[in-house]
Amino acid sequence: MDRQPQFPPIYHPRRLSENDAHEAAVAAARAGAEAATLLWADRADAIDLAVVLRPDGATRYPENIAYVGMNAVGDALGGLLPEQAPVAFEWPDRVLVNDGCIGGTRLAAARTASLGQPPDWMVWSVLLAIEPDPDDEPGHHPDVTTLGDEFAYRELFAIPDLLEAIARFFLRWTVRWQEDGFAPVRAAWMERALGHHEQEIARRVFFRVDAIDDDGTVTLRRDGLKRILTIGQGMQRRTWWLPDRFGAYKAMAEAGDPARARAIGRDGDA
């Protein structure tokens, strides 16, 4: 990495020499890490960042931080990538550029003692594929891509620029959510919802988001099917996957099922 990222002073940054900021943040949260502890892996091939949160009960439905975080990622990418490269979301956790998944977000939380009680801690994280694999054949993973596969991204930004932008927009969206409620968060998320504007997309099979309630519950539709799920249910298991070299495919060995491993993740207590 050419330089170390500089984060807003509200954060307590920790640079990791190993990958998997999500797991490191969950361990830190369980060990008592304070709110706004930000962990990031010092790597050149991916954005690997996580934030420890300590909900205090003042904000309703703290699990809606999942939408806040995706908005932060969308704004960070949107501000650095060319305008002709659309950034889209697929509920609940997938981030797409030019119709290809470049990674996604995760959410973990401590178990609460009683219904309605905010968790003692939460962890929000993001993993985005940056560098393409020079040994990877084109089309080998048709549903996923990297920023390096789509652009000469080094002419647009450096890794620290994107880390800083995500952290900055995460803070801005968190403050706006706390001050103005969930409505602007929902509106911004829906602006990037896959298929929301009937834009041309390569992949036709997906659940379209019809509506998001104030508590984060979503109404999904596809080919006459309708599903209603809470954001907590949606974030229990990761729906996105990346090749194993990014560290997002470890569940395969643990589950002993490569097909299922593409749709699951390793969660904390969530």
Image (tube, grey):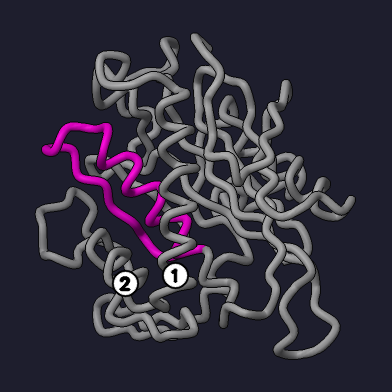
Badge 2 element: helix
Q: Within 10 Å of the Cα at label 1, are there few (<14), some (14-19), or many (20+) other Cα atoms?
A: some
Which residue occupies the foreground of this view, 5 or 29? 5
How many labels, in total? 2
Q: Within 10 Å of the Cα at label 2, are there few (<14), some (14-19), or many (20+) other Cα atoms?
A: some
Marks 1 and 2: CB-CB under 8 Å? yes
Q: Earlier in the sequence, mark 1 or mark 2?
A: 1
Which residue occupies the foreground of this view, 24 or 79? 79
Q: Which mark is residue 177?
A: 1
Vertical placement of 56 versus 35: above or below?
below
Q: As drawn, is 269 to the left or to the right of 69?
A: right
Vertical placement of 172 versus 151: above or below?
below
Residue at the image position 24 percent from the left and 77 percent from the top: 223
Residue matched to label 2: 184
The amino acid type, in three-letter code, at marker 2 is Pro
Residue at the image position 45 percent from the left and 44 percent from the top: 168
The amino acid type, in three-letter code, at marker 1 is Trp
Residue at the image position 83 percent from the left and 47 percent from the top: 27
**Residue 246 location (% of width, % of height):** 56, 29
Per the rendered image, the range of residues in magenta is: 66-92
Q: Which mark is residue 225?
A: none
Q: As drawn, is 83 to the left or to the right of 215?
A: left
Vertical placement of 192 versus 77: above or below?
below
Q: Quadrant of residue 136?
A: top left
Badge 1 element: helix
Residue at the image position 43 percent from the left and 85 percent from the top: 214
| 136 falls in the magenta region | no
**Residue 120 location (% of width, % of height):** 79, 69
